[in-house]
Amino acid sequence: MNTSFNLFDFVGGVHPAENKTQSTQSSISSAGIPEKLVLPLTQHIGAQSKPLVNVGDTVLKGQLIAAAQGFISANLHAPTSGKITAIEDRAIAHQSGLSDLCIEITTDKQDKWIEHSGIANYQDIDASQLISLIQEAGVTGMGGAGFPTHVKVSAKPDAIKTLIINAAECEPYITADDMLMQERANDVISGIQILAHILKPESVLIGIEDNKPKAAEALNLALKESPENTLIEVIVIPTKYPSGGEKQLIQILTGKEVPSGGLPSSLGIVCHNLGTAYAINSAITKGEPLISRITTMTGNACAAPQNYEVLIGTPVKHLLEVSNTDIKNTSRLVMGGPMMGFTIDQIETPIIKASNCIIAATKQELPDPAMEQACIRCGMCTEACPAQLLPQQLYWFSKSSNLEQAESHNIADCIECGACSYVCPSNIPLVQYYRFAKGEIKQATADKLKSDRAKVRFETRLARQEREAAEKVAKRQARAEAAAKKQAQKKAAPAQEASDSKAPPAADIELLQKKFDATKAGVTKTKEKLAILLADENADPEKIELLKGALTKAQTKMKDAAKVMAEAKKAEKASAFTSSDKGDPNTPERLKNKLDLAQSRLETANKRLEEAKAENSDKIEAFETAVTKQLERVNDAKLALETAIKTSATNNVPASVDLETLKQKVLAAQTRVDKANERLNMAKEQNLETVGALQTGLDKQTSKLVDAKAALEQASTEEAK
Amino acid sequence: MKLPNISSPHTTRPFSTSNVMLNVLMALIPGIIALTYFFGPGHLIQVLIASTVALASEAAVMKLRKRPILFYLKDYSALLTAILLAISLPPYAPYWVTIIASAFAIIVGKHLYGGLGQNPFNPAMIGFALVLVSFPVPMTTSWSAPAELLPAAFSSGISFSDAMTYIFSSRETIDSITSATPLDAYKHQVALATESEIYQNPLFKGTDHSSFIVLAWEWVSIGFLLGGLYLLWKRIFTWHIPVSLLASLALCSLIFGWDADSFVPTSLHLFAGATMLGAFFIATDPVSASTTPLGKLIYGAGIGTFIYVIRTWGAYPDAVAFAVLLMNFAAPFIDQYTQPRTYGHNKPKRGLAAKK
């Protein structure tokens, strides 16, 4: 059979009891149509397909019922005609034992096909068209993994040098591919040829173990019958588990190793299962989508172990019934082989596209796992490992959750074939430990990614906050500097009018007020003390004199404080009005007012003088000076007025009658009245001699205020008109 | 009936730890037969004492740890340790020496580290080293001469009752049967005499100078060699350690001690003393040895070298125990740096910690 083909070998491997002869005694039978079919929407690697039907729809055999979502996904077709009775979560064939969305079809036993037709001469069809036909047919890997086939055959042109067909079927018990080759070799070869036509490799190798002589013979016969192919070779390899693993088969047939984490296509090699080739043939030449597969039903609890052609979605229960399996005697139900298969605990679990075997094992056949003993570090696992790992070390690391070391010892390269657990004398479930560790590593990687992103976000936020704070500080500094600059400028130009510069703020006036009140209080106190002393007959005359002196001092202080306060108030009030607001001070009106004011003052001064003369008080001189001053002012005012009238007559400056000015005048008058009132009140309290004068002053100011208000009202009514 | 959910694989090879241990025990039989034939029933009695004490100690410890006693005794690991210890000890060592060695080996050498599979040192060698260092006189003066060389009173060999007396009660007349071992004798005489002179002593070639290599001991070594080859065939362990041990010992001897007039000759190194026992049964103890293939070669070579060094320049005539213990120290380190290349990788990842 192998003429001059150079075979390589892989390191390790084991030779478990084959147990294949039980199921090769009969030919493939049909499992029939069960009552209901349960079709999981994820029977393949990739995205879940989306149902296209609704509950209650009637479907035909081969009708598309779920569409692929994205490139790495697969279509799903109805395996027989019937009615959609449910689309819900059901138990699925998976190691996790979890459930997933499934479409349930209640069959009508009619088995009515949808319209379909195959292609007679696929050689005339373009490769890309063939690939899309394969995609439409929903063909996925039938070897066990279920990778969408159209993805695997979509290689770049000239990228694939070697096409390997995996007919090794190295696991014990499984004989599905064996029987398929024995009975339908022609279809298989046709499928392989279609693949070769699509991929155009330089060589096609069918790797088959030497425990299948009949199958190899059948293949060779079929090859002889189709002479147009010269590429396909049947290579018989020694029986060893796990030589059917993709990586191991590639190593056996080509001597090359698939790079860790990489794909065989990087070596120019692609590997397809025999059953997939058969399905491709059905899809292209017959137009039949993937709706059934060959599944081995075996195990000692099964009365008639053999291979069945099973509709996808057939519940295992149906298969058990058809094959006369004693479910009570079954201590373990395994889907797949004994080395890599997983247990099923619900017999309603459906057969999916990748289910190649069901083992209904009795207790003696697959006994309960023995108690795990201590690892004696014998190294038999290392000898058996086909991936050249150190299973013993991986065991220690997985057991202690030392994920770092496990990763560094290449736990990711473990293909979970189970050879190490098989040989372990201490019955340690090594593969279970590795699965646990792999899960933990995956979770830890995802967590780390999440935390790295969170860290980046946090740091960015921190930087932003710092930046904002820095900006605030900078702004504040800039403002402070500007303010300081302004202050400096002001200090450098002290000859500004009080109205232009900053007025003594209200706080200063308050302070002065406080001072004044304090002095007032002082005066009151001293007066009281004096009164007490005067009332007392035995008072010391010296003390009285002292107190009198203190009283005079206090009164002077009060007067000074009052003066300062008055000036401050005047300045503040003055600053409230800019010179522009006041308007032109040299208008005839204002000058007239000034004149009137000066004259009234003069009259007051004269009156006071006469009073002082009459009383013969010592203030006569002061009053005389006052009178002289007032006289001067009157004369000045008269002069100013005359000049103003002259200029206004020549300039024809219209007298401003605007409301603003009037308002200002009213305000000014009001303030004057207030001032006069204050002075009067103060004088009254102190019982000063100036009370009378001040009273007259106040009356005058009040009348002026009334006039001003009247003028304003008049002007506003005129404006309103 | 509830179907179970169990992880794959669902089948295992019908070969358990107790199978491994029993195979090793069976492989020891030829050597033990040779020992008893040439040196009297001493070893058998020692085996009995050591086994009893070892099993009792293990049972006591398991009781303290609240484990099922019989389950742990049935893996025969304690029995194997005891028997290896017993045949390493001199056949007529006092009973208390054996008891102490055995108890120490099981309790301290094995269980204090966590039990089966956890001990970094070979338990039998730990026990042996303890008594060798603590009781040097009984350990060096309890070796009996081969049957051929015994005085007339023991013409039919040492009887069972005599052996019991020597071991358990009076040791007054033990000098009549004791002698130095060939390795010991050669080592001490080589400073003064030449090879041919030394070989005049019937200890080496027998009274009629008919032995190939060394009287009696050659058969013992061949017995153990056969046992070791049986275990290799059964794939209980791989060839790496025995081959590298013997090769390095031979090489050292040939390079440094090729002159038989100045050094112990290579043939004596290989066939006298505990070399074969050490190579196939002691150094290959999987728990304390290196696990990687390259590591095993280095480990074995290290032991061979140490055996030669201690024998030639050290104080002890037979150095297997110390050589093994010294390399036990190094085994984890050797493992770290001799990881094999994994499928799909270009280079092996060696050294500590995670390197992706």
Image (cartoon, rainbow, N blue to C red):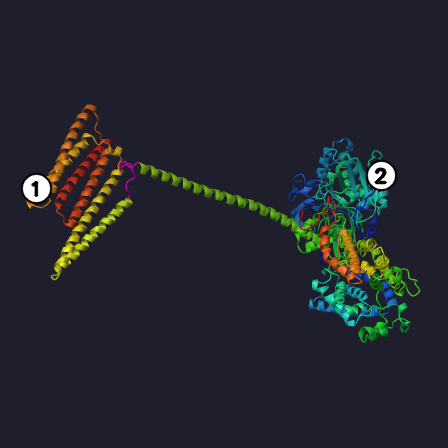
Q: Earlier in the sequence, mark 1 or mark 2?
A: 2
Q: Secondary structure at mark 1?
A: helix
Q: Check disc 2 and give the amino acid type.
A: Ala
Q: Secondary structure at mark 2?
A: helix
Q: Left or right of A703: which side holds A30?
A: right
Give the number of the disc on residue A222: 2
- Judging by the rendered image, the residue that carries numbered circle 1 is A610
Residue A183 x/y as whole percent:
83, 43
Residue A599 x/y as whole percent:
13, 36
Give the number of the disc on residue A462: none
Residue B347 x/y as whole percent:
73, 45
Residue A290 x/y as whole percent:
73, 41
As for residue A695 lying within the magenta part, the answer is: no
Magenta span covers which residues?
A493-505
Q: Quadrant of residue A113?
A: top right
Q: Give me the C-alpha separation between circle 1 and circle 2.
A: 154 Å
Q: Left or right of A458: which side holds A205?
A: right
Res A343 seen here: no
Question: Principal SS element in the magenta part?
Answer: loop
Q: Quadrant of the C terminus of chain A?
A: top left
Q: Left or right of A708: which side holds B158?
A: right
Res A282 seen here: yes
Q: Quadrant of the N terminus of chain A?
A: top right
Q: Residue furthest left?
A: A614
Q: Nearer the viewer, residue A121 or B254?
A: B254
| Neighbours of disc 2 within 10 Å: few (<14), some (14-19), many (20+) | some
Q: Quadrant of residue A491?
A: top left
Q: Check disc 1 and give the amino acid type.
A: Glu
